[in-house]
Amino acid sequence: MALTIYPAIDLKNGQVVRLAEGDMDRATIYADDPAGQAGRFAAIGANHLHVVDLDGAFAGESRNGDAVRGILAAFPGQVQVGGGIRSRAQAEAWLDAGVWRVVMGTAALEDPMLVRALAGEYPGAVVVAVDARDGMVAVRGWAEKSTVSVVDLARRFEDAGVAALLFTDVGRDGMLKGVNIEATAGLADAVNIPVIASGGVAGMEDIIALRRYPKIEGVICGRAIYDGRLDLAQCL
């Protein structure tokens, strides 16, 4: 199975940024025009985008809506959006706006029945984010660590019809340390849901390693692309 490459556009105050280990105070600004960045990714050949409203993740509701709508208008491929989507109204508003998939993390832990209901009503349109700090689920913009393990949370959605699990090792995100292959593959082996890898992609060696695991359906690439360590065209 081909590995889907998701270039990442993380939004803070309407700008394209990358955080280090999910820390909002350690943000590097890469672009002032999110729609323009989406267009550049499309021109290179990307068919998928992963967009995160970082301000929304902390606020619990959309904070970069205009930027996301601009991205949707500029990018002809499939866009998945996360960050603060914690209600039916928020999820449905993005799906109605043309978002391909909504990513729900905090809601998956705190309101699992909502996520299950949405996954049933919108087949293939809901991704559950399982973000890990030391193997435990982190929520609310990764600011809080729960007492629930990543595998336990993932298993709660095995029969719900979610499109995929998005697994991020928070300690590696934005750090170019390399993907946590062992933990990502372990989660993929533990559940019957496709897994998207995220956090720490440093270069092509990570992409090659992930391709060895057929249950890992995709990988999100951020800082490595922006810093020139990963050639997106070659990757695609």
Image: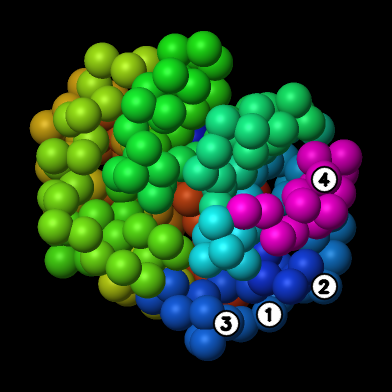
User: Whole-Å distance between the Cαs marked 1 and 3?
Assistant: 6 Å
Question: Is residue 219 a member of the stretch shown in magenta?
Answer: no
| Crowd tier of the residue under label 4, counting other residues whose Cα lies within 10 Å: few below 14, some 14–19, many 20 or above | some
Residue 69: mark in rendering: 4
User: Residue 50 location, x and y as percent?
Assistant: 59, 47
Q: Do the residues labelled 1 and 3 touch (CB within 8 Å)?
A: yes
Give the residue at mark 1: 29
Q: Of the two numbered discs 4 and 3 on the same chain, state the one appearing first in sequence.
A: 3
Q: Do the residues labelled 1 and 4 touch (CB within 8 Å)?
A: no
Quadrant for the C terminus, please: top right
In the depicted structure, whether residue 196 falls above or below residue 11: above
Q: In the rendered structure, which segment of residues is drawn in magenta?
A: 61-75
Give the residue at mark 2: 32
Kind of residue sitting beneath label 2: Asp
User: Residue 6 location, x and y as percent?
Assistant: 55, 45
Q: Judge from the rendering whether residue 136 lies leftward or rightward of residue 115; answer left or right.
A: left
Give the residue at mark 3: 27
Q: Residue 179 or 20: which is nearer the viewer?
A: 20
